[in-house]
């Protein structure tokens, strides 16, 4: 019997100050840069015939900027996207592709196609943030000491 793991997503509505907003945008911008670098490397190697799963160089570059846990999570999310793509590709070749899937293509970049700008988002591991309550006000505490 296969046990299915449950995934949970927490969404927060934030009211950052201008300084906090700049820090959040920087975090999301660099997260998108990491995703796009890892994804570019994998796309190039895939189209050359074999996927390069090693993202150690990118991890080392971004762990100081984003924090080790966040860099690790973004790379893992990219791994997951590529594994899903490869599984769908295999199903397509076997003629067993689900009916709702019309096109199988490699994971895309974190980029808005219309504007050409990066999509600003990040992935924070569940043990890398916490919620503090100070004087009746709740704050989200993120990696690198960012409090919003």
Image (cartoon, helix red, strand yellow):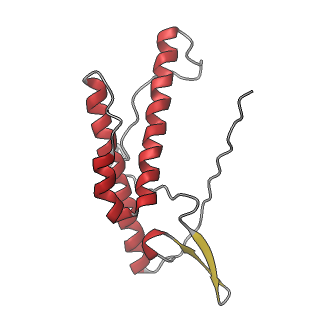
In the image, farthest residue toward the right? 1
For residue 133, side relative to residue 37 (left or right) = right
Q: Is residue 117 visible?
A: no
Q: Residue at x 40, y 64 (%)?
A: 67
Location of residue 113 (image quadrant) = top left
Quarter holding the N terminus is top right
For residue 58, side relative to residue 92 (left or right) = left
Q: Residue at x 55, y 67 (%)?
A: 129
| Vertical position of residue 134 compared to residue 3: above or below | below
| Vertical position of residue 61 compared to residue 49: above or below | below
* Residue 60 location (% of width, % of height): 30, 55
Q: Residue at x 29, y 39 (%)?
A: 40
* Residue 95 location (% of width, % of height): 53, 9
Camera-nearest residue between 3 and 13: 3
* Residue 23 location (% of width, % of height): 38, 72
Location of residue 122 (image quadrant) = bottom left
Q: Is residue 31 visible?
A: yes
């Amino acid at each position: 019997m296969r046990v299915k793991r449950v995934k949970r997503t927490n969404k927060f509505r934030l009211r950052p100050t201008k300084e906090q907003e700049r820090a959040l945008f920087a975090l999301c911008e660099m997260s998108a840069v990491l995703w796009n670098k890892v994804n570019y490397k994998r796309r190039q190697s895939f189209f050359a015939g074999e996927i390069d799963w090693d993202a150690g160089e990118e991890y080392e570059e971004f762990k100081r900027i984003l924090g080790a846990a966040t860099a690790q999570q973004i790379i893992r999310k990219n791994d997951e996207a590529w594994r899903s793509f490869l599984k769908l590709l295999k199903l397509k070749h076997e003629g067993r592709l689900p009916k709702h899937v019309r096109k199988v293509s490699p994971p895309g970049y974190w980029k808005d196609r219309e504007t050409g700008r990066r999509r600003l988002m990040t992935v924070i591991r569940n043990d890398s943030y916490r919620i503090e309550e100070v004087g009746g006000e709740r704050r989200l505490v993120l990696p690198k000491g960012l409090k919003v």
